[in-house]
Image (cartoon, rainbow, N blue to C red):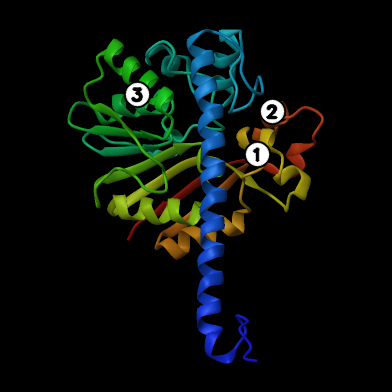
């Protein structure tokens, strides 16, 4: 009787193709599951902030406090100034983030900036002040509740050079060769497909355009139980990539002059994101910079 298994010599190509398709489908499902979980978590953060309630990990980049002064304290620890905090719409600063990407962005009047994972619009509004009326800032976020919050903030404060678009940072709703600068604050670590994030960032940037990113990176391999902890993932820790991995992703996307600068002082606030977990043995914040040739 003929062997009908998938391992027949004349069926090997089909078998291999079917397995590859099944594997790709499984990976896509896992990625969608992660995005949906993150989207739900950040929708709760936005809703809690609207209601001045606590949500998630109280001091982390994925949580807000019931004490609004905590959000201010968090932002000051990240390198923002009191002037920064006073010149954004009320509610834009939710104490999220792990650094200040504008500190390395070197923005100029007239530039076009794209903010990956713009949330309530905090960094977008600050960037808009720097690029001025002749410039433009496009914030992209995949959470409708955050998008509504940012748009309401823009309307309240009459920001006319900022717009907020619904979309994923892996597939930006932005045309090719649009941006002079891409900024992002503690968001890329949440992506299940970081190589695609950098590929699409490269597409969107003009020649000579630059990345100016603050994000959480892994200083060494994290234990599996931490990697698989959904609270640590939503809290911007478990999804962090090793510095060497990020360099490879960026280089493969086409970026040059790649520079990743870990910030040891960030451990002072990151330790509060997951009390008792010794998370700073594995992750810290970093500035991430690169140029599109």
- For the residue carrying disc 1, how many other residues have a C-alpha within 10 Å: few (<14), some (14-19), or many (20+)? many
Dot 3 falls on a residue whose secondary structure is: helix
Q: CA distance from mark 1 to mark 3?
A: 26 Å
Whether residue 180 appears in this view of the structure is yes
Query: Among all residues in the image, which is located at the extreme right?
Result: 276
Q: Residue at the far left: name it.
A: 134
- Which residue was labeled with disc 2? 273
Q: Please say whether residue 79 is visible from this viewpoint.
A: no
The answer to whether mark 1 and mark 2 are in CB contact below 8 A is: yes
Q: Position of residue 13 (x, y in %)?
A: 51, 83
Q: Nearer the viewer, residue 141 or 121?
A: 141
| As drawn, 92 above or below 201 | above
Question: How far across and how far down the image is residue 25, in percent?
Answer: 51, 58
Q: CA distance from mark 1 to mark 2?
A: 9 Å
- Mark found first going from the N terminus, 1 or 2: 1
Q: Disc 3 versus disc 2: distance between alpha carbons?
A: 26 Å
Q: Residue at x 64, y 88 (%)?
A: 3
Residue pictured at 43% horizontal, 35% vertical = 117
Which comes before the other along the chain, label 1 or label 3?
3
Give the answer, above or below, for where 27 lies relative to 60. Answer: below
Q: Which of the 4 image quadrants contains residue 226?
A: top right
Please state which of residues 139 and 27 is positioned toward the viewer in this rendering: 27
Residue 255 in percent (x, y) is at 41, 59
Q: Which residue is mark 1?
A: 237
Q: Circle 3 sits on which residue?
A: 125
C-beta proximity under 8 Å, tags 1 and 3: no
Q: Which is more N-terminal, label 2 or label 3?
A: 3
SS assignment at label 2: loop
Q: Nearer the viewer, mark 3 or mark 2?
A: 2
Name the mark nearer the viewer: 1 or 3: 1
């Amino acid at each position: 009787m003929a062997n009908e298994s998938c391992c027949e010599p004349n069926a090997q190509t089909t078998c291999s193709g079917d397995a590859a398709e099944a594997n790709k489908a499984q990976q896509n499902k896992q990625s969608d599951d992660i995005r949906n979980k993150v989207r739900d978590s950040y929708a709760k953060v936005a809703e809690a902030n609207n209601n001045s309630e606590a949500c998630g990990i109280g001091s982390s980049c994925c949580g807000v406090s019931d004490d609004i002064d905590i959000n201010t304290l968090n932002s000051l620890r990240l390198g923002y100034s009191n002037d920064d905090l006073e010149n954004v719409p009320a509610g834009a600063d939710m104490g999220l983030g792990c650094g200040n990407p504008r500190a390395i962005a070197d923005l100029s009047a007239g530039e076009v900036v794209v903010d990956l994972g713009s949330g309530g619009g905090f960094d977008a509004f600050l960037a808009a002040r720097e690029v001025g009326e002749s410039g433009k800032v496009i914030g992209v976020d995949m959470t409708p509740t955050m998008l509504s919050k940012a748009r309401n903030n823009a309307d309240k404060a009459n920001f006319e050079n900022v717009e907020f678009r619904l979309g994923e940072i892996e597939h930006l709703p932005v045309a090719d060769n649009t941006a002079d600068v891409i900024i992002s604050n503690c968001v890329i670590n949440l992506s299940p497909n970081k190589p695609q994030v950098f590929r699409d960032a490269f597409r969107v940037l003009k020649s000579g355009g630059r990345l100016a990113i603050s994000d959480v990176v892994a200083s060494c391999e994290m234990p599996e139980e931490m990697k698989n902890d959904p609270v640590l993932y939503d809290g911007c820790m478990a999804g962090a990539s090793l510095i060497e991995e990020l360099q490879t992703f960026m280089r493969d996307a086409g970026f040059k002059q790649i520079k990743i600068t870990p910030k040891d002082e960030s451990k002072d606030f990151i330790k509060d994101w997951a009390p008792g977990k010794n998370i700073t043995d594995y992750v810290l914040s970093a500035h991430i910079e690169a140029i599109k040739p």
